[in-house]
Image (cartoon, helix red, strand yellow):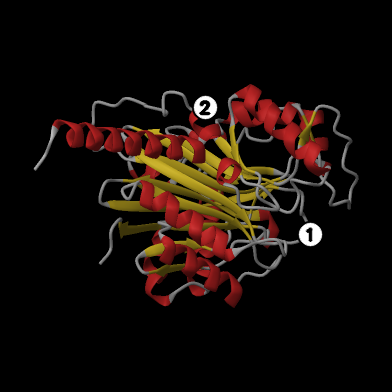
Amino acid sequence: MITPKSLTLAVLVLAAGAIGFLWRDAYRYPAQLKLQPADVAITSPDATEPVRMLLTGDIMLGRSVQTQWESRGTDFTFARIRPDFVGQDLIMGNLEGPILENAPHTPTGSTRFSFPSAAVGMLKSAGFSAVSLANNHSFDYGKAGYEETGQLLDRAGIGHFGHPLKIDTDQSAYQVRVRDNTVRLLAVNATFPSFSLAQATTTVAEMKSLMPTAYVVVLIHWGEEYQLQANQIQQNIAHALINAGADTVVGHHPHVVENIEVYRGRPIFYSLGNFIFDQYFATETQRGLLLKTEIYPMRAAYELVPVKINRSQPQVMGASTSSWQAASTSSQPASGSGGQAGQATSARTEFLEALAARSAPELHDQIISGRLELARFPR
């Protein structure tokens, strides 16, 4: 028999549980919710319009890259790629080093990176929403340099997440809402012995269980430098992350574009390669991949956008606009531009063909087309 006293007690228990759940969610993502007070509620008259997210490879803004933009102006670095950023709801990449107010210029050949505070303005002007700090260079100037980087990014309104030595939900996770869709990201560094796969998978599982409809992305620093094929350790980690609930896994660190795999209906982009770097010694280190993702309620589409890096300045291969943009417009090349355009298109085709050849055979045709489409909730 339900008495007034027992009913009151039940209401109190339910209320306490609801408060606890909300507190737990806010506790796990405090920085992100603070950085995005309106949950990035970008309005749109089209309820079916997808969330558009662009991910880049490694971003290194010091050493010879710094020499270039200091002599040519801070707009130089992103000048040729900026048009391809237009229309994206979220733009994120791996920031390969700390940003400091009094950053020393990194000498040629040194791998202890630091970037001047002007780099923050460059990222902001280019349209970056957030950057991952989970890599082997974020602590190049110690904990103080890592923390100063976060402070400078905070002032500019650029999100940041990920820690080089630990997986901490306060620092490693990032959450954003776009048109009533939730995207949750986790950044981890697997290049140090401190990496814990158990902690990573537990965190992914928690992120997914708190909101099963959220799209969960893991950005991971891992693998062997300059290897075009991911190793078995990377594959084991990726499969474990997807088993835990990740919708996609995106890698950095090898400085070259590695193979692509689909596991249990979820894509794994083992390495996007360099985005902005000064590794001029090989063709592969001067090529990268932009990953443009369109997230719909029941499916996700992935556009593979090859980029070439000319003296640390990235540009899309084949055209100044992405393949999807080009497909939506019909135009003829200007007089005298046919040969140049043909060479650019050929370079893009050769890049995608090589990527397809070292990726899962069942993805061959999709990779060559530059587009993958997968169900959000595969059976």
Looking at the image, residue 134 sits to the left or right of residue 141; the answer is left
Above or below: residue 258 compared with residue 339: below
> Residue at the spot x=43%, y=39% of the render?
25
> Residue at the spot x=42%, y=66% of the render?
243
Estimate how packed mark 1 is, as few (under 14), some (14 to 19) or many (20 or more) residues with alpha carbons within 10 Å.
few
Amino acid under disc 1: Phe
Question: Where residue 26 sits: x, y (%)?
Answer: 46, 35
Frontmost residue, 352 versus 363? 363
Q: Element under label 1?
A: loop
Residue 170 in view in this figure: yes
Residue 47 in view in this figure: no
Question: Where residue 332 sits: x, y (%)?
Answer: 40, 41
Amino acid under disc 2: Lys
Looking at the image, residue 372 sits to the left or right of residue 171; the answer is left
Residue position for label 1: 281
Q: Quadrant of residue 193?
A: bottom right
Question: Where residue 315 sits: x, y (%)?
Answer: 59, 44
Frontmost residue, 28 versus 4? 4
Above or below: residue 238 compared with residue 212: below
Residue position for label 2: 34
Question: Where residue 330 sits: x, y (%)?
Answer: 33, 40
Total marks shown come to: 2
